[in-house]
Image (cartoon, rainbow, N blue to C red):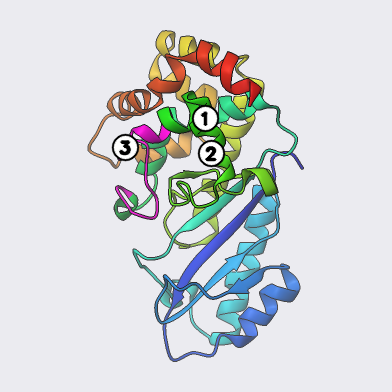
Amino acid sequence: HQDDMGVELEIEFTAGIDYTPVLSFVKKKNNWVVDKDGSLRGVSYEFITPPADPTTHFNAFISFEEELERTTGYSPRKLITASHRTSTHVHLNFNKDGTMDTLKFIALYYLFEQVLIELADADRKHNTFCVSSNTIPFLISDNIVNKHHFSKGITDKDANKYASLNFSRFLDLGTIESRIMHGYKNALAVSNWLCVLKDLKVSSRTRFKSLTDINNSFLNIPCTDFLAMVFPKSVDNILTQLKKKDRPLKEIIADGYRSAYAILQNAFIVEEGVAGV
């Protein structure tokens, strides 16, 4: 499906327990690929899911947790350890999206990037494996506005592969990867994150005609209403999480607008130039 997503779950487990039955279960039942990741430590695995919608993913996550508890006798909360080394990567499918719809998604992503980062654990901020456009502002101007650099950014798989928004598999798989979210905690938390990203992708395609439309909407609509426009199914969850933060929503979005400025304030250049890439 056009809006299905593939997920990579990095998990470090409590040592001293045999996880072999669980690994076999998710391979057979959920069709997950189980791999080792050199960036993780101890008893750790990377679980790679097939593309699916958030509800299908949620059911698979639940079955994983139930099997984990059934075979070990322990709650997943006691077995899955919190670690700054783990993260959740989401691959969004753009094979059926046109150039302008893809650019609208990129613009909205950068516009809300600081909001999205606030939904993750604090160690995802300024993380070297999740470099935000706020940390390195030239990522946007080099990769999107400048036609030459944009072409290089999507053809060179090593270019910006650790950026918050990673284009390295765009040409061969037609996907763009979001690297913001922290490691797996529970099924609901990951599923909520997938719903946020799906809202963003669907809205970029269906609610805005152009980059100029996004820019005008942002400038003329109150920030909470604009948030609800882009995240219609996730807005309540987002606002609930942001209330726990010290910074007001308007300030967070303002940071995002500064990051997305290179796209939105150069909409004509982007729409007329990059659309031809």
Mark closer to the observer (3, 1):
1
- Do the numbered discs 2 and 1 sit on residues whose CB atoms are within 8 Å? yes
The percent position of residue 249, horizontal first and vertical second, equals 32, 28
The stretch of residues the image draws in magenta is: 125-140
Identify the element where label 2 is drawn: helix
The percent position of residue 209, horizontal first and vertical second, equals 63, 14
Q: Is residue 77 visible?
A: yes
Front-most of 88 and 177? 177
Q: CA distance from mark 2 to mark 1?
A: 6 Å
* Residue matched to label 2: 152
Mark closer to the observer (3, 2):
2
Determine the residue positioned at 45% across, 14% down. 266
The percent position of residue 155, horizontal first and vertical second, equals 59, 43
Label at residue 243: 3
* Residue matched to label 1: 148
Residue 272 horizontal side relative to residue 82, left or right: right
Q: Amino acid at mark 1?
A: His
Binning the other alpha carbons within 10 Å of mark 2 as few (below 14), some (14 to 19) or many (20 upward) gives few
Q: Amino acid at mark 3?
A: Lys
Precedes in sequence: disc 3 or disc 2? 2
- The answer to which image quadrant residue 260 occupies is top left
Binning the other alpha carbons within 10 Å of mark 3 as few (below 14), some (14 to 19) or many (20 upward) gives few
In the rendered image, residue 30 lying in the magenta stretch gets the answer no
Q: Amino acid at mark 2?
A: Lys
